[in-house]
Image (tube, rainbow, N blue to C red):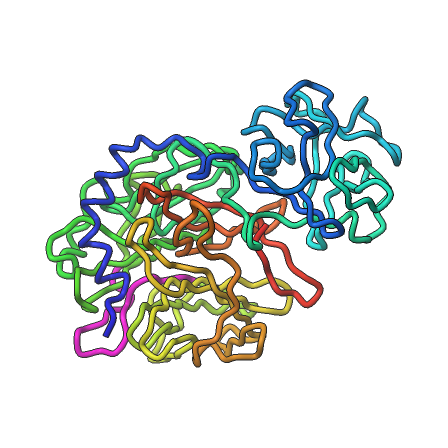
Amino acid sequence: MFPAKSTIRLGRAALLVAALAAALITAPTASAVIGSPLVGAGSGRCLDVAGNNTALGTEVSIWDCNGQANQGWHFTSSGELRTFDDTRCLDAYGHGTTAGTRLVIWSCTGAANQKFRLNGDGSVTATNSGLCLDVLNHGTANGTRVILWTCTGTPNQKWSTGSAGYPNPGYVTGDVGVHDPTVVKRPTGDYLVAHTGDNIALKTSADRTTFRNAGQAFPGGASWTTTYTNGGRNLWAPDISYHNGQYYMYYSASSFGSNRSAIFLATSPSGNSGTWTHRGLVIESRTSDNWNAIDGNLIVDDQGRWWLNFGSFWSGIKMIELNPSTGMRLNNTFLSIAGRGGGDIEAPFIFKRGSYYYQYVSFDRCCQGASSTYRVMVGRSTSVTGPYYDRNGVNMNSGGGTQILASHGSIHGPGHQAVLADTDGDFLVYHYYADNGVSLLGINRLVYDSAGWPSVQ
């Protein structure tokens, strides 16, 4: 039997913590260029700042993709489309709002003519005019200008991000060293992140871009977990959500080489360090079980029923029903919702959008630094309890799953994903490893095709 994440994490915990401390992480991504290429569907060429020129007013065009800074673009949380390692913004020249308006780079001002939106159909629109980024006259040659034009849905107005279909993580900065992240947007509009660490590590952000350390959920320790951690303080894979005026956090305790594991619940009125109250043991697994009680995730279905999905390796991903009044286990319901015949699967996260429940899981190996092979898979169901099928109709209980994110370039082992529904769209939140083995925060927008299947932008 291959070891689950629970059999790897603790053994590598000291190395991970040391690496994080030594790195003093401030870099937004592991790659040399901030952002990802925008590749034109009609040309196969990248949105490019002409001549690699940083001068204000330089026009944009298409050019062979080359990975340079003038082809690295990212959307900020405020809608800017930045390039040149975050030093220049795409700008509708002269605040133009008519078809044919030139697109140039300029100093980032936050003005309306520098706000853009990437749409689910691959088009990019200027928010103050509703016009689309358009390759002039459907051109496909190097140097063809990109302008604003009435949206037509044609290939010269469609763009995709990243290499091999996978974008680099979006721009984040500050305290971005995380492992197994989960995030919730507070009623006040800021963001709370929890992740694997001693006594559960916390971070906050005002804008989904800059993050800062916010201490530990249990600064005084979590003595009730030590039976499962062999006395250690490292607690894993929290899941945070906000219900009934308070924050709920499900989190895992385990030890190296064992599925003697447990998922606990804590609640807090604010989510801040030191305000979390231990509510009790939700479920535990023993070495005689063929499943593992880690990586819990709460989903509330359309009927208001609460469910906890969880699991790692062994016989796969499980689900139990919870009491909405207490957040604790309601009955003896025990379902299997995904599995690979004992193989590498864990970190389930179920997210409802439209008529479907989407189950995201991580396949393959975590926690091995730049050698990690984690990848993000998804299936969906019209019922929260399944069955879940991938895009090809394969049941997730039979190893099914459609891949939407995997290692590429300097991004290694992206996984242990969560989904954040924000006012400007849905976002995949995950960790990945840099070339030096440090684990970092990744955030990317999710978009959906005409059949409702998600992809990462």
Residue 428 vs residue 11, the one in the foreground: 11
Name the residue: 52% across, 35% down. Answer: 34
* 398 relative to 152, above or below: below
Residue 424 lies, in percent from the top left, at: 63, 45
Residue 167 lies, in percent from the top left, at: 55, 48
Say which quarter of the image contains residue 439. top left
Name the residue: 35% across, 79% down. Answer: 341
Residue 255 lies, in percent from the top left, at: 17, 60
Quadrant location of the N terminus? bottom left
* 149 relative to 349, above or below: above
Say which quarter of the image contains residue 134. top right
Query: Is residue 128 one of those drawn in magenta?
Result: no
Name the residue: 20% across, 60% down. Answer: 254
Looking at the image, residue 138 sits to the left or right of residue 5; the answer is: right
Residue 276 lies, in percent from the top left, at: 30, 46
Q: Please give the range of residues in magenta.
A: 280-298
Looking at the image, residue 233 sits to the left or right of residue 188; the answer is: left
